[in-house]
Image (cartoon, helix red, strand yellow):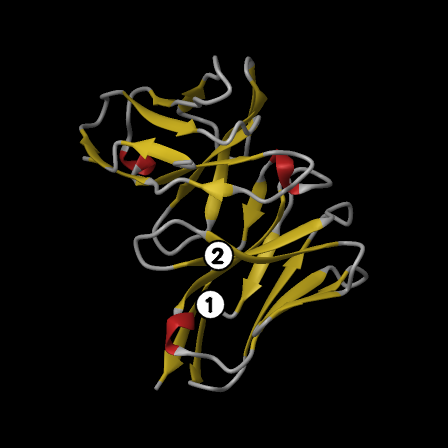
């Protein structure tokens, strides 16, 4: 199993551009998450999904959108990128009733 | 959502000594408390977790204690080694109850092991 994979690893965006961060897991986990980690800080929950077709907001959802059309994929969409969205983005997944979350390697995004 | 406070932000200990990191949480309904280790440029890795039905859990040199009455939990690392140097994060469920609906993290503790 590859676990949780994310693409791209790095990206530089200009203010106002948009992009999609990809996340895929091959563990058949039905719960998936997006977090952001600002320098020197802990992770903050952006969105999560409990299964295909179901998504919900976390602590910092503004400026982002998600979709979940399959169990494996959970893309994160940034519309109108802003410098405040410069961060490292981590995708994670789990299979309830377990709580253990498995993280992807992260995407480092810079908005200039 | 849950609020998690973590202390200290930096901890420097001599190799072989013990290290203790403390966290407090706000939601009394929370029942799952993981600890993650993150090396520079890497993803967070779960090192130990505890559920609210136990007060302590050990795994070799690592232990976690939980005081539900006081709403705090701690990470204990004994016989520290150079490879223990990293940033450690505590977490609690963002929504009431278990962690499957997402986690809220502390700000992290940078643990430095001095040779």
Pointer 1 or 2: first along the chain = 1
Q: Rounded to the nearest whole Å, what is the CA distance between mark 1 and mark 2?
A: 8 Å
Q: Quadrant of the N terminus of chain B?
A: top right
In the rendering, at what x and y percent does residue B97 appear? 73, 41
Is residue B78 found left or right of B111 in the rendered image?
right
The mark found on residue B9 in the picture is: 1
Q: Residue at x 43, y 22 (%)?
A: A73
Q: Quadrant of the C terminus of chain B?
A: bottom left
In the rendering, at what x and y percent does residue B4 appear? 60, 53
Q: Residue furthest front?
A: A1
Say how many tags the image has: 2
Q: Is residue A13 above or below residue B62?
A: above
Q: Residues within 10 Å of mark 2 (few under 14, many from 20)?
A: many
The mark found on residue A102 in the picture is: none
Q: Are marks 1 and 2 in contact (CB under 8 Å)?
A: yes
Instruction: Give the chain letter at badge 1.
Output: B
Q: Is residue A57 above or below residue A90?
A: above
Q: Is residue A46 above or below residue B21?
A: above
Q: Are marks 1 and 2 on the same chain?
A: yes
Is residue A101 found left or right of A1 in the rendered image?
right
Q: Quadrant of residue A89?
A: top left
Front one among A73 and A63: A73
Question: What residue is disc 2 on?
Answer: B107
Q: Is residue B67 above or below residue A23?
A: below
Q: Residue at x 29, y 21 (%)?
A: A80
Instruction: Give the chain letter at badge 2.
Output: B
In the rendering, at what x and y percent does residue A8 appear? 25, 32
Q: Residues within 10 Å of mark 1 (few under 14, many from 20)?
A: some
Q: Secondary structure at mark 1?
A: loop
In the rendering, at what x and y percent does residue B63 appear? 63, 69
Q: Residue at x 70, y 41 (%)?
A: B98
Q: Secondary structure at mark 2?
A: loop
């Amino acid at each position: 199993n590859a676990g949780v994979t994310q693409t791209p690893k790095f990206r530089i965006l200009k203010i106002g551009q948009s992009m999609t961060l990809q996340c895929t897991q091959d563990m058949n986990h039905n719960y998936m998450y997006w977090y952001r980690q600002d320098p020197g800080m802990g992770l903050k929950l952006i969105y999560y999904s409990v299964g295909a077709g179901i998504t919900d907001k976390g602590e910092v959802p503004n400026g982002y959108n998600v979709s979940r059309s399959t169990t494996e994929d959970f893309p994160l969409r940034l519309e109108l990128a802003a410098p405040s969205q410069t961060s490292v983005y981590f995708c994670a997944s789990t299979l309830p009733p377990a709580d253990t979350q498995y993280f992807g390697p992260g995407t480092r995004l810079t908005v200039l | 959502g849950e609020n998690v406070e973590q202390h200290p932000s930096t901890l420097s200990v001599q190799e072989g000594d013990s290290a203790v990191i403390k966290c407090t949480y706000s939601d009394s309904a929370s029942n799952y408390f993981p600890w993650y280790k993150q090396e520079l440029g890497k993803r967070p890795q779960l090192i130990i977790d505890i559920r609210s039905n136990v007060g302590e859990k050990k795994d070799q040199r690592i232990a976690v204690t939980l005081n539900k009455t006081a709403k705090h939990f701690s990470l204990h690392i004994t016989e520290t080694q150079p490879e223990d140097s990293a940033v450690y994060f505590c977490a609690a469920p963002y929504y009431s109850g278990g962690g499957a609906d997402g986690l809220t993290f502390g700000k992290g503790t940078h643990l430095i092991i001095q040779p």
